Image (spheres, rainbow, N blue to C red):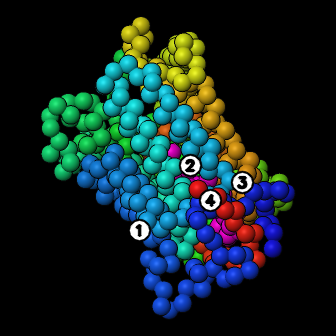
């Protein structure tokens, strides 16, 4: 049976292993007799991904959030290598081409201090690639619903800590890892905020009558909170769509409504733009499919959100903060300087952001597009945009409303990256949403977590790559 939403001539998944049963023979995994153990069958466990995502609040509380993704990526990579075969789906290879170019950008690192930050960024990008690869290969244990339920734990954590930040904005968590790190490290402001995280980012620009308490936890900065909220909200709506019980749908919807309280408190324009772009995109796609009842329900929800935004005074607070913070014109100056500096090394960039003494801000820090362009050159930026755009095009026919919400994560990312950066958890959200859609497409899997409808024996045979 041909994949119902694969374009004509689409390449089947590629498998990196020396041998594979012929399509006419039952797969050993499918057969799985009583004498076969999980290890012998080559089944990848779900727990590393569950520990990464569902364990996110614990990592934050321990001060391990900056280190846990890389550590768990190494675990997943080891499990993949031990199993001895790796399945690829079209759409993943551009990420690894981008990763190779990031490695080439190391030639322009100015000193050892810059190399530390570069190594962290490279490690995070490599971890994201491993997460996608692991999910694609963990078909027996990781369904789309199970993975996104774990992503939902991250969303719940963001919302609850955002609410806590509104009540205790000055609270700073004393973590075990922060307590044992040497003072030479914790004296760095970024390291200090990562291992001794504050609940809120407190800002009082010159002339402001009172400080702005902007929710930040479980991230060090309010902008990171806003980016995570914008990307995770479509994931939460996916969970509403696939929820099997009315009470779980109701609980998720209630938390969605409540989530906009800390979201509006951030007074984050880019976050609101991202949410508007992603939600508007899904509504238009649902309308194009003729599902007018769903469109009406979503339109009522959007209207209620806009009404709450205006009635609560949040819109006035957002505009009021701009009176004391000229961030728009400041960003334009930074973008102009970043572009000029990029042209000095247009191919491989500068290896990472660098301080510009004339404006007092590091170039390559005011938006992910600008960071990629400055750090890894125009080629690096092009490879990343190709990965994202290629994934959007390949998964354009995402089935059902659930598929559209996951596709909305990718569209939301497009709306955000010109203005804000993507840290490890934010980039992981985008990458896993794409991996879910790609695996569902090329393995003919449903997105609601149910067992595949198509027997494995009649799926297109995998393409073999022999080393």
In this orientation, which residue lies closer to the viewer: 327 or 3? 3
According to the picture, the residue beneath numbered tag 4 turns out to be 466
200 versus 50 height, above or below: above
Magenta segment includes 328: no
Tell me: 17 left or right of 103.
Answer: right
Question: Could you say which quadrant of the image residue 29 lies in?
Answer: bottom right
Where residue 345 sits: x, y (%)?
54, 16
User: In x, y percent, where is residue 160?
Assistant: 39, 55
Which numbered disc flags the more N-terminal residue, 2 or 3? 3
Front tag of 4 and 2 = 4
Where are the magenta residues, as a range? 425-448
Residue found at x 44% / y 28%: 106
Res 436 quadrant in image: bottom right
Q: CA distance from mark 1 to mark 2?
A: 20 Å
Q: CA distance from mark 3 to mark 1?
A: 27 Å
Q: Which residue is mark 1?
A: 47
Say what secondary structure mark 1 lies in: helix
How many residues crowd mark 1 within 10 Å: few (<14), some (14–19), many (20+)? few
**The disc label shown at residue 453, or none:** none
Residue at mark 3:
395
Disc with the residue nearer the chain's start (1 vs 4)? 1
Q: Is residue 210 above or below residue 295?
A: above
**Which residue sits furthest bottom?**
34
* Residue at image point 31% right, 54% down: 59
């Amino acid at each position: 049976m041909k994949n119902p939403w694969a374009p004509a001539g689409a390449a089947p998944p590629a498998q990196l292993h020396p041998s594979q049963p012929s399509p006419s023979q039952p797969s050993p995994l499918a057969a799985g007799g009583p004498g076969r153990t999980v290890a012998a069958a080559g089944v990848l466990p779900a727990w590393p991904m569950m520990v990464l995502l569902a364990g996110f609040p614990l990592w934050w509380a321990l001060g391990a959030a900056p280190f846990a993704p890389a550590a768990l990526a190494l675990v997943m990579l080891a499990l993949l290598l031990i199993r001895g075969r790796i399945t690829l789906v079209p759409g993943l290879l551009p990420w690894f081409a981008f990763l190779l170019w990031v490695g080439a950008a190391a030639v322009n690192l100015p000193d050892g201090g810059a190399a530390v930050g570069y190594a962290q960024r490279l490690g995070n990008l490599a971890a994201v690639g491993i997460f996608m690869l692991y999910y694609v290969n963990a078909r027996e244990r990781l369904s789309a619903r199970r993975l996104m339920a774990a992503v939902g734990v991250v969303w719940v954590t963001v919302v609850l800590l955002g609410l806590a930040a509104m009540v205790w904005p000055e609270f700073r968590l004393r973590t075990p890892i922060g307590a044992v790190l040497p003072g030479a490290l914790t004296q760095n402001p970024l390291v200090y905020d990562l291992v001794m995280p504050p609940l809120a980012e407190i800002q009082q620009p010159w002339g402001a009558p009172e400080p702005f308490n902007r929710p930040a936890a479980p991230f060090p900065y309010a902008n990171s909170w806003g980016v995570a909220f914008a990307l995770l909200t479509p994931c939460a709506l996916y969970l509403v769509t696939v929820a099997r019980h009315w009470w779980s749908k109701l609980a998720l919807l209630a938390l969605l409504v409540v989530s906009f309280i800390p979201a509006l408190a951030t007074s984050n324009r880019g976050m609101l733009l991202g949410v508007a772009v992603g939600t508007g995109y899904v509504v238009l796609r649902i309308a194009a499919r003729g599902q007018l009842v769903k469109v009406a329900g979503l339109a009522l929800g959007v209207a209620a959100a806009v009404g709450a935004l205006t009635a609560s005074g949040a819109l006035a607070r957002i505009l009021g903060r701009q009176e004391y913070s000229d961030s728009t014109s400041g960003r334009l100056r930074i973008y102009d300087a970043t572009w000029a500096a990029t042209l000095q090394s247009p191919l491989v960039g500068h290896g990472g952001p660098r301080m510009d003494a004339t404006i007092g801000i590091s170039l390559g820090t005011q938006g992910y597009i600008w960071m990629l362009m400055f750090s890894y050159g125009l080629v690096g930026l092009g490879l990343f945009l190709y990965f994202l755009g290629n994934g959007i095009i390949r998964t354009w026919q995402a089935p059902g409303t659930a598929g559209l919400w996951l596709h909305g994560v990718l569209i939301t990312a497009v709306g955000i990256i010109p203005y804000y950066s993507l840290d490890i958890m934010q980039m992981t959200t985008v990458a896993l949403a794409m991996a879910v859609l790609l695996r569902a497409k090329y393995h003919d899997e449903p997105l609601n977590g149910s067992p595949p409808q198509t027997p494995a024996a009649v799926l297109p045979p995998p393409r073999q790559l022999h080393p």
